Image (cartoon, grey):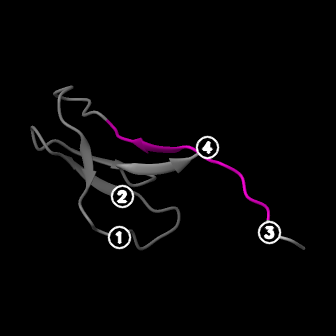
Amino acid sequence: MPEVKKEVRTYKVRYVCDRCGIGDMEATGVVPKGYPGTYPHSCNHCGAFQTFDRQYPEIRLE
């Protein structure tokens, strides 16, 4: 089957801190062991801690 090209848009998805509303939540780099895993994040402004089922910032293609 031949290759087919299609233009896509790239988006950076960030999660704004629920506590301070200023900083972004950033993954701490700790990798989950179980499934489904949760990724720990900390706010780059106030240091708040929260876990998500994905890592932020996230790159999405549409």
Mark 3, residue position = 3
Say whether residue 5 is magenta: yes
Q: Position of residue 40 (x, y in %)?
A: 29, 56
User: The residue under label 1 is which amino acid type?
Assistant: Val
User: The residue under label 3 is which amino acid type?
Assistant: Glu
Counting residues from the N terminus, which is met first, the one under dot 3 or under dot 2?
A: 3
**Residue at image point 52% right, 67% down:** 35
Task: Point out which mark residue 62 bears.
Answer: 4
Q: Quadrant of the N terminus?
A: bottom right
Counting residues from the N terminus, which is met first, the one under dot 4 or under dot 2?
A: 2
User: The residue under label 4 is which amino acid type?
Assistant: Glu
Counting residues from the N terminus, which is met first, the one under dot 4 or under dot 3?
A: 3
Mark 2, residue position = 39
Which residue ends up furthest to the top in the rendered image? 21
Range drawn in magenta: 4-15
User: The residue under label 2 is which amino acid type?
Assistant: Tyr
Q: Position of residue 37 (x, y in %)?
A: 45, 62
**Residue at image point 52% right, 48% down:** 60
Q: Residues within 10 Å of mark 2 (few under 14, many from 20)?
A: many
Q: Is residue 7 left or right of residue 21?
A: right
53 and 61: which is toward the camera: 61
SS assignment at label 1: loop
Give the label, 4 or 2, closer to the camera. 4
Q: Are marks 2 and 1 in contact (CB under 8 Å)?
A: yes
SS assignment at label 2: strand
The CA span between labels 3 and 1 is 35 Å
Say whether residue 39 is magenta: no
The CA span between labels 4 and 2 is 24 Å
2, above or below 38, in the image = below
